Image (tube, rainbow, N blue to C red):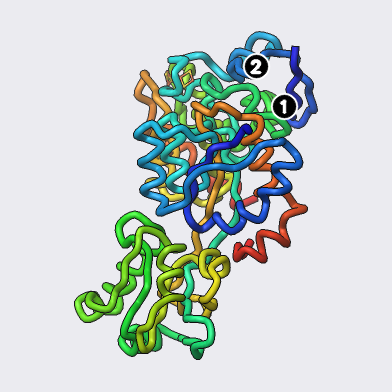
Amino acid sequence: MNSLNILSGGAAQGLVGSLTQAFKAQTGFDIAGEFGAVGLMADKLRKGASADIVILTAALLARLAEEKLVVAASIADVGLVETALAVRAGDPPVTVRDAVGLREAILASDAVFVPDTKASTAGIHVANVLQQLGISDQAADRLRIFPNGATAMRELAASDARRPIGCTQSTEIISTKGVTLSGSLPPGCELATMYTAGITTAAAHPQQAQELIGLLTGADQREQRKRAGFVS
Amino acid sequence: MPSVRFRLNGVELDVDADPDRSLLDILRGQLGVTGPHFGCGAGECGACNVIVGDRAVTACDTPLWSVADKDVTTIEGLGTSERPHPLQRAFIAEQALQCGYCVSGILMSAAALLRRNPSPTSREVKEALDRNLCRCGSHQRMVRAVLRAAEEMAAG
Ligand code: FES
Ligand code: FES
Protein backbone atom coordinates (compact mmCIF):
# COMPACT_ATOMS: atom_id res chain seq x y z
CA MET A 1 0.00 0.00 0.00
CA ASN A 2 1.34 3.44 -0.95
CA SER A 3 1.60 6.04 1.71
CA LEU A 4 2.44 9.72 1.91
CA ASN A 5 5.17 10.54 4.40
CA ILE A 6 4.55 13.48 6.66
CA LEU A 7 6.59 15.32 9.27
CA SER A 8 4.39 17.67 11.25
CA GLY A 9 4.11 19.76 14.34
CA GLY A 10 1.82 18.12 16.86
CA ALA A 11 -0.64 20.98 16.44
CA ALA A 12 -1.82 19.59 13.10
CA GLN A 13 -2.17 15.95 14.15
CA GLY A 14 -5.90 16.13 14.90
CA LEU A 15 -6.68 17.87 11.62
CA VAL A 16 -4.57 15.46 9.54
CA GLY A 17 -6.24 12.53 11.33
CA SER A 18 -9.68 13.86 10.46
CA LEU A 19 -8.72 14.11 6.76
CA THR A 20 -7.09 10.70 6.41
CA GLN A 21 -10.18 8.97 5.04
CA ALA A 22 -11.02 11.69 2.56
CA PHE A 23 -7.38 11.68 1.41
CA LYS A 24 -7.41 7.93 0.93
CA ALA A 25 -10.65 8.08 -1.01
CA GLN A 26 -9.16 10.78 -3.25
CA THR A 27 -5.70 9.31 -3.84
CA GLY A 28 -5.63 5.70 -2.61
CA PHE A 29 -2.76 6.71 -0.31
CA ASP A 30 -2.44 6.28 3.44
CA ILE A 31 -0.70 8.88 5.58
CA ALA A 32 2.39 7.78 7.48
CA GLY A 33 4.83 9.81 9.46
CA GLU A 34 5.57 11.63 12.60
CA PHE A 35 4.03 14.39 14.66
CA GLY A 36 6.10 16.17 17.27
CA ALA A 37 7.85 19.33 18.37
CA VAL A 38 8.35 21.49 15.27
CA GLY A 39 12.06 22.03 15.88
CA LEU A 40 12.68 18.29 16.08
CA MET A 41 10.64 17.61 12.94
CA ALA A 42 12.62 20.25 11.01
CA ASP A 43 15.89 18.72 12.20
CA LYS A 44 14.74 15.27 11.07
CA LEU A 45 14.17 16.65 7.59
CA ARG A 46 17.58 18.33 7.68
CA LYS A 47 19.15 15.02 8.63
CA GLY A 48 17.61 13.32 5.63
CA ALA A 49 14.39 11.75 6.93
CA SER A 50 12.26 10.91 3.93
CA ALA A 51 9.15 13.06 3.88
CA ASP A 52 6.82 14.26 1.12
CA ILE A 53 5.13 16.99 3.10
CA VAL A 54 5.84 19.01 6.22
CA ILE A 55 3.41 21.00 8.36
CA LEU A 56 5.26 23.40 10.65
CA THR A 57 5.18 26.99 11.81
CA ALA A 58 5.30 29.55 9.02
CA ALA A 59 8.67 30.89 10.19
CA LEU A 60 10.27 27.45 10.28
CA LEU A 61 8.89 26.46 6.90
CA ALA A 62 10.23 29.68 5.34
CA ARG A 63 13.65 28.77 6.69
CA LEU A 64 13.43 25.23 5.26
CA ALA A 65 12.53 26.75 1.88
CA GLU A 66 15.64 28.96 2.09
CA GLU A 67 17.63 25.84 2.89
CA LYS A 68 16.15 24.32 -0.29
CA LEU A 69 14.55 21.45 1.60
CA VAL A 70 11.01 22.61 0.83
CA VAL A 71 9.64 23.87 -2.51
CA ALA A 72 8.85 27.53 -1.76
CA ALA A 73 6.01 27.76 -4.26
CA SER A 74 4.20 24.86 -2.60
CA ILE A 75 3.88 26.56 0.79
CA ALA A 76 0.32 27.27 1.91
CA ASP A 77 -1.14 28.55 5.17
CA VAL A 78 -3.25 26.01 7.05
CA GLY A 79 -4.40 28.27 9.89
CA LEU A 80 -3.70 29.94 13.21
CA VAL A 81 -3.49 27.94 16.41
CA GLU A 82 -3.61 29.43 19.89
CA THR A 83 -1.56 28.25 22.81
CA ALA A 84 -4.09 27.48 25.55
CA LEU A 85 -4.67 26.06 29.00
CA ALA A 86 -6.01 22.60 29.76
CA VAL A 87 -7.34 20.76 32.79
CA ARG A 88 -8.17 17.10 33.46
CA ALA A 89 -11.67 16.24 32.29
CA GLY A 90 -13.97 16.72 35.27
CA ASP A 91 -11.71 19.19 37.09
CA PRO A 92 -12.98 22.75 37.54
CA PRO A 93 -11.75 24.97 34.69
CA VAL A 94 -9.00 27.50 35.27
CA THR A 95 -10.05 30.87 33.96
CA VAL A 96 -7.40 33.53 33.83
CA ARG A 97 -8.21 37.10 32.83
CA ASP A 98 -4.79 38.66 33.06
CA ALA A 99 -1.12 37.95 33.67
CA VAL A 100 -1.59 38.09 37.45
CA GLY A 101 -4.34 35.47 37.22
CA LEU A 102 -2.08 33.23 35.13
CA ARG A 103 0.72 33.60 37.67
CA GLU A 104 -1.69 32.60 40.46
CA ALA A 105 -3.07 29.65 38.49
CA ILE A 106 0.43 28.29 37.84
CA LEU A 107 1.52 28.75 41.44
CA ALA A 108 -1.71 27.15 42.72
CA SER A 109 -1.07 24.09 40.60
CA ASP A 110 1.15 21.22 41.74
CA ALA A 111 1.93 19.90 38.23
CA VAL A 112 2.07 21.87 34.98
CA PHE A 113 2.12 19.64 31.88
CA VAL A 114 3.89 21.15 28.88
CA PRO A 115 5.72 20.05 25.71
CA ASP A 116 9.47 20.38 25.07
CA THR A 117 10.49 23.85 26.26
CA LYS A 118 13.32 24.09 23.73
CA ALA A 119 11.93 22.66 20.50
CA SER A 120 8.14 22.99 20.56
CA THR A 121 6.22 26.18 19.85
CA ALA A 122 4.04 25.99 22.96
CA GLY A 123 6.86 24.79 25.23
CA ILE A 124 9.21 27.58 24.19
CA HIS A 125 6.37 30.04 24.77
CA VAL A 126 5.60 28.65 28.25
CA ALA A 127 9.26 29.06 29.22
CA ASN A 128 9.18 32.68 28.00
CA VAL A 129 5.93 33.43 29.84
CA LEU A 130 7.25 31.98 33.11
CA GLN A 131 10.23 34.27 32.75
CA GLN A 132 8.01 37.23 31.94
CA LEU A 133 5.93 36.48 35.06
CA GLY A 134 9.11 36.18 37.13
CA ILE A 135 8.36 32.61 38.29
CA SER A 136 10.76 30.48 36.23
CA ASP A 137 12.54 29.23 39.35
CA GLN A 138 9.41 28.82 41.47
CA ALA A 139 7.63 26.89 38.72
CA ALA A 140 10.61 24.72 37.74
CA ASP A 141 9.83 21.87 40.16
CA ARG A 142 6.20 21.61 39.06
CA LEU A 143 6.86 21.62 35.31
CA ARG A 144 6.23 18.22 33.73
CA ILE A 145 7.95 18.38 30.36
CA PHE A 146 7.24 15.85 27.58
CA PRO A 147 8.60 15.56 24.04
CA ASN A 148 5.40 16.90 22.48
CA GLY A 149 2.01 18.36 23.35
CA ALA A 150 0.00 15.20 22.68
CA THR A 151 2.11 13.23 25.17
CA ALA A 152 1.96 16.06 27.70
CA MET A 153 -1.84 16.08 27.42
CA ARG A 154 -2.12 12.29 27.73
CA GLU A 155 0.02 12.50 30.87
CA LEU A 156 -2.17 15.30 32.19
CA ALA A 157 -5.24 13.12 31.64
CA ALA A 158 -3.61 10.28 33.60
CA SER A 159 -2.14 12.51 36.31
CA ASP A 160 -2.95 11.88 39.97
CA ALA A 161 -1.69 15.31 41.03
CA ARG A 162 -3.95 17.37 43.29
CA ARG A 163 -4.50 20.28 40.91
CA PRO A 164 -2.73 19.69 37.60
CA ILE A 165 -2.99 22.00 34.61
CA GLY A 166 -1.53 21.87 31.11
CA CYS A 167 -0.47 24.38 28.52
CA THR A 168 0.00 23.55 24.85
CA GLN A 169 -1.52 24.20 21.41
CA SER A 170 -5.34 24.22 21.58
CA THR A 171 -5.53 21.67 18.75
CA GLU A 172 -3.61 19.14 20.86
CA ILE A 173 -5.86 19.72 23.86
CA ILE A 174 -8.99 19.26 21.73
CA SER A 175 -7.71 16.04 20.19
CA THR A 176 -6.75 14.36 23.49
CA LYS A 177 -9.31 12.36 25.47
CA GLY A 178 -9.39 13.02 29.20
CA VAL A 179 -8.43 16.70 29.06
CA THR A 180 -10.55 19.80 28.55
CA LEU A 181 -9.69 23.10 26.90
CA SER A 182 -9.74 25.74 29.60
CA GLY A 183 -9.35 28.99 27.73
CA SER A 184 -6.68 30.97 25.96
CA LEU A 185 -3.70 32.58 27.64
CA PRO A 186 -4.51 36.11 28.86
CA PRO A 187 -3.62 39.33 27.01
CA GLY A 188 0.10 40.01 27.10
CA CYS A 189 0.86 36.29 27.45
CA GLU A 190 -1.09 34.99 24.45
CA LEU A 191 0.34 33.33 21.37
CA ALA A 192 -1.29 32.52 18.03
CA THR A 193 0.93 30.64 15.60
CA MET A 194 0.42 30.26 11.86
CA TYR A 195 0.95 26.69 10.68
CA THR A 196 1.83 26.15 7.05
CA ALA A 197 2.24 23.13 4.84
CA GLY A 198 4.88 22.62 2.17
CA ILE A 199 6.15 19.90 -0.14
CA THR A 200 9.74 18.77 0.24
CA THR A 201 12.19 19.13 -2.64
CA ALA A 202 12.90 15.40 -2.33
CA ALA A 203 9.22 14.37 -2.27
CA ALA A 204 8.54 10.98 -3.82
CA HIS A 205 4.83 11.79 -4.20
CA PRO A 206 4.51 15.53 -4.87
CA GLN A 207 1.14 15.19 -6.58
CA GLN A 208 -0.43 13.41 -3.62
CA ALA A 209 1.23 15.89 -1.27
CA GLN A 210 -0.42 18.67 -3.25
CA GLU A 211 -3.79 16.97 -2.86
CA LEU A 212 -3.31 16.78 0.90
CA ILE A 213 -2.44 20.49 0.99
CA GLY A 214 -5.64 21.10 -0.98
CA LEU A 215 -7.60 19.27 1.72
CA LEU A 216 -5.75 20.95 4.60
CA THR A 217 -6.41 24.44 3.25
CA GLY A 218 -9.62 24.02 1.21
CA ALA A 219 -12.70 26.16 1.85
CA ASP A 220 -14.77 22.94 2.17
CA GLN A 221 -12.70 21.89 5.19
CA ARG A 222 -13.13 25.17 7.11
CA GLU A 223 -15.54 23.55 9.57
CA GLN A 224 -13.14 20.63 10.12
CA ARG A 225 -10.28 23.05 10.82
CA LYS A 226 -12.43 24.94 13.29
CA ARG A 227 -13.42 21.75 15.07
CA ALA A 228 -9.75 20.75 15.29
CA GLY A 229 -8.97 24.07 17.01
CA PHE A 230 -7.66 26.29 14.22
CA VAL A 231 -8.95 29.81 14.75
CA SER A 232 -8.76 30.95 11.13
CA MET B 1 2.82 15.29 -22.39
CA PRO B 2 1.11 16.25 -19.14
CA SER B 3 -0.36 19.69 -18.88
CA VAL B 4 -0.12 22.10 -15.94
CA ARG B 5 -2.69 24.88 -15.55
CA PHE B 6 -1.88 28.14 -13.78
CA ARG B 7 -2.56 31.87 -14.05
CA LEU B 8 0.30 33.98 -15.39
CA ASN B 9 -0.15 37.70 -14.75
CA GLY B 10 -3.89 37.12 -14.51
CA VAL B 11 -4.23 35.01 -17.67
CA GLU B 12 -5.17 31.35 -17.33
CA LEU B 13 -2.74 29.04 -19.15
CA ASP B 14 -2.34 25.35 -19.85
CA VAL B 15 1.28 24.44 -20.37
CA ASP B 16 2.21 21.12 -21.94
CA ALA B 17 5.57 20.27 -20.44
CA ASP B 18 7.37 17.92 -18.12
CA PRO B 19 6.06 19.01 -14.67
CA ASP B 20 9.58 18.65 -13.23
CA ARG B 21 11.02 21.35 -15.51
CA SER B 22 11.80 24.64 -13.84
CA LEU B 23 9.28 27.44 -13.98
CA LEU B 24 12.01 29.82 -15.21
CA ASP B 25 12.78 27.54 -18.13
CA ILE B 26 9.10 27.42 -19.10
CA LEU B 27 8.60 31.17 -18.68
CA ARG B 28 11.64 32.25 -20.67
CA GLY B 29 11.51 29.42 -23.25
CA GLN B 30 8.06 28.12 -24.09
CA LEU B 31 6.16 31.25 -22.98
CA GLY B 32 8.64 33.93 -24.08
CA VAL B 33 8.32 35.82 -20.80
CA THR B 34 11.86 37.08 -20.34
CA GLY B 35 11.47 39.52 -17.43
CA PRO B 36 12.67 36.96 -14.89
CA HIS B 37 16.41 36.60 -15.46
CA PHE B 38 18.70 33.61 -15.28
CA GLY B 39 21.54 34.35 -12.86
CA CYS B 40 22.90 31.44 -10.90
CA GLY B 41 20.30 28.80 -11.78
CA ALA B 42 20.65 27.44 -8.28
CA GLY B 43 18.21 29.44 -6.18
CA GLU B 44 20.95 31.63 -4.74
CA CYS B 45 20.78 35.05 -6.40
CA GLY B 46 17.10 36.03 -6.83
CA ALA B 47 17.49 37.33 -10.41
CA CYS B 48 14.70 34.98 -11.45
CA ASN B 49 12.25 35.89 -8.67
CA VAL B 50 8.54 35.79 -9.41
CA ILE B 51 5.56 35.93 -7.07
CA VAL B 52 3.59 32.72 -6.56
CA GLY B 53 0.40 33.41 -4.62
CA ASP B 54 1.72 36.07 -2.28
CA ARG B 55 5.33 34.93 -1.89
CA ALA B 56 8.43 35.77 -3.90
CA VAL B 57 10.14 32.56 -5.03
CA THR B 58 13.16 31.76 -7.16
CA ALA B 59 11.70 30.48 -10.45
CA CYS B 60 14.91 28.66 -11.48
CA ASP B 61 14.43 25.96 -8.84
CA THR B 62 10.64 25.99 -8.73
CA PRO B 63 9.28 22.90 -10.45
CA LEU B 64 6.40 23.58 -12.81
CA TRP B 65 4.11 21.16 -10.91
CA SER B 66 4.30 23.32 -7.80
CA VAL B 67 2.48 26.25 -9.42
CA ALA B 68 -0.52 24.21 -10.60
CA ASP B 69 -3.73 26.21 -10.05
CA LYS B 70 -1.77 29.14 -8.59
CA ASP B 71 -1.26 32.77 -9.52
CA VAL B 72 2.19 33.53 -10.90
CA THR B 73 3.21 37.19 -11.30
CA THR B 74 6.31 38.24 -13.16
CA ILE B 75 7.72 41.73 -13.70
CA GLU B 76 5.57 41.88 -16.85
CA GLY B 77 2.49 41.74 -14.60
CA LEU B 78 3.71 44.41 -12.19
CA GLY B 79 3.53 47.48 -14.42
CA THR B 80 4.14 48.72 -17.96
CA SER B 81 6.20 51.58 -19.42
CA GLU B 82 2.96 53.53 -19.79
CA ARG B 83 1.68 52.66 -16.31
CA PRO B 84 4.64 51.76 -14.12
CA HIS B 85 4.13 50.33 -10.65
CA PRO B 86 5.03 52.76 -7.82
CA LEU B 87 8.09 50.56 -7.16
CA GLN B 88 9.26 50.98 -10.73
CA ARG B 89 8.74 54.77 -10.53
CA ALA B 90 10.64 54.89 -7.24
CA PHE B 91 13.56 52.85 -8.63
CA ILE B 92 13.87 55.33 -11.49
CA ALA B 93 13.52 58.36 -9.20
CA GLU B 94 16.17 57.05 -6.80
CA GLN B 95 18.38 55.84 -9.69
CA ALA B 96 18.46 52.56 -7.87
CA LEU B 97 20.01 50.46 -10.61
CA GLN B 98 23.13 50.28 -12.66
CA CYS B 99 23.25 47.33 -15.10
CA GLY B 100 19.71 46.35 -14.09
CA TYR B 101 20.23 42.59 -14.34
CA CYS B 102 19.10 41.88 -10.79
CA VAL B 103 16.28 44.42 -10.76
CA SER B 104 13.32 42.43 -12.05
CA GLY B 105 13.93 39.89 -9.27
CA ILE B 106 14.43 42.60 -6.67
CA LEU B 107 11.23 44.34 -7.69
CA MET B 108 9.28 41.09 -7.25
CA SER B 109 10.73 40.55 -3.75
CA ALA B 110 9.84 44.15 -2.90
CA ALA B 111 6.34 43.84 -4.38
CA ALA B 112 5.68 40.68 -2.32
CA LEU B 113 6.88 42.52 0.79
CA LEU B 114 4.60 45.52 0.18
CA ARG B 115 1.61 43.24 -0.39
CA ARG B 116 1.93 41.73 3.07
CA ASN B 117 3.44 44.75 4.80
CA PRO B 118 2.49 48.08 3.18
CA SER B 119 4.65 50.21 5.50
CA PRO B 120 7.88 48.32 6.17
CA THR B 121 10.80 49.69 8.13
CA SER B 122 14.18 50.00 6.50
CA ARG B 123 15.25 46.88 8.38
CA GLU B 124 12.25 44.91 7.08
CA VAL B 125 13.07 45.96 3.52
CA LYS B 126 16.67 44.83 4.00
CA GLU B 127 15.46 41.49 5.36
CA ALA B 128 13.08 41.01 2.41
CA LEU B 129 15.87 41.75 -0.08
CA ASP B 130 18.49 39.82 1.84
CA ARG B 131 18.54 36.92 -0.59
CA ASN B 132 18.68 39.08 -3.73
CA LEU B 133 22.21 39.67 -4.95
CA CYS B 134 23.25 42.79 -6.85
CA ARG B 135 26.77 42.71 -8.17
CA CYS B 136 26.65 46.44 -8.98
CA GLY B 137 26.21 47.22 -5.29
CA SER B 138 23.04 49.29 -5.63
CA HIS B 139 21.46 47.94 -2.45
CA GLN B 140 21.30 51.15 -0.42
CA ARG B 141 19.52 53.05 -3.16
CA MET B 142 17.16 50.13 -3.67
CA VAL B 143 16.16 50.14 -0.01
CA ARG B 144 15.47 53.88 -0.27
CA ALA B 145 13.41 53.29 -3.40
CA VAL B 146 11.26 50.61 -1.75
CA LEU B 147 10.58 52.90 1.23
CA ARG B 148 9.71 55.72 -1.17
CA ALA B 149 7.28 53.48 -3.08
CA ALA B 150 5.65 52.39 0.18
CA GLU B 151 5.11 56.05 1.15
CA GLU B 152 3.70 56.88 -2.25
CA MET B 153 1.33 53.91 -2.13
CA ALA B 154 0.18 54.85 1.39
CA ALA B 155 -0.54 58.39 0.22
CA GLY B 156 -2.73 56.84 -2.47
S1 FES C 1 18.82 32.39 -11.23
FE1 FES C 1 17.34 31.78 -9.82
S2 FES C 1 18.17 32.30 -7.93
FE2 FES C 1 19.75 32.77 -9.31
S1 FES D 1 22.09 46.68 -10.87
FE1 FES D 1 23.59 45.39 -11.75
S2 FES D 1 23.40 43.53 -10.68
FE2 FES D 1 22.11 44.86 -9.64
B67 vs A117, left or right, is right
Name the kind of residue labelled 2 in the image.
Leu
Q: Which residue is mark 2?
A: B27
Q: Nearer the viewer, residue A225 or B39?
A: A225
A30 vs B142, left or right, is right
Quarter of the image holding residue A206?
A: top right
Report the number of numbered marks: 2
Mark 2, secondary structure of its residue: helix
Inspect this view and state whether residue A17 appears: yes
The reply to whether the residue tagged 1 has its Cβ within 8 angstroms of ligand 1 is no
Q: Position of residue B152 (x, y in %)?
A: 57, 46
Q: Position of residue A36 (x, y in %)?
A: 43, 53
Quarter of the image holding residue A119?
A: bottom left
Above or below residue A50? Residue A78 is: below
Query: Which image quarter is the N terminus of chain A in?
Result: top right
Quarter of the image holding residue B31?
A: top right
> From mark 2 to mark 1, how far is it between C-alphas?
9 Å
Inspect this view and state whether residue B91 appears: no
Residue sticking out furthest to the top: B29
Mark 1, secondary structure of its residue: strand
User: Which label's residue is closer to the chain start, 2 or 1?
Assistant: 1
Q: Which residue is mark 1?
A: B8
**Chain at tag 1:** B
Q: Are marks 2 and 1 in contact (CB under 8 Å)?
A: yes
Residue found 47% across the figure and 37% down from its top: B145
A29 vs B148, left or right, is right
At label 2, counting other C-alpha atoms closer than 10 Å, the crowd grade (few under 14, some 14-19, many 20 or more) is: some
Name the kind of residue labelled 1 in the image.
Leu
Q: Position of residue A98 (x, y in %)?
A: 43, 85
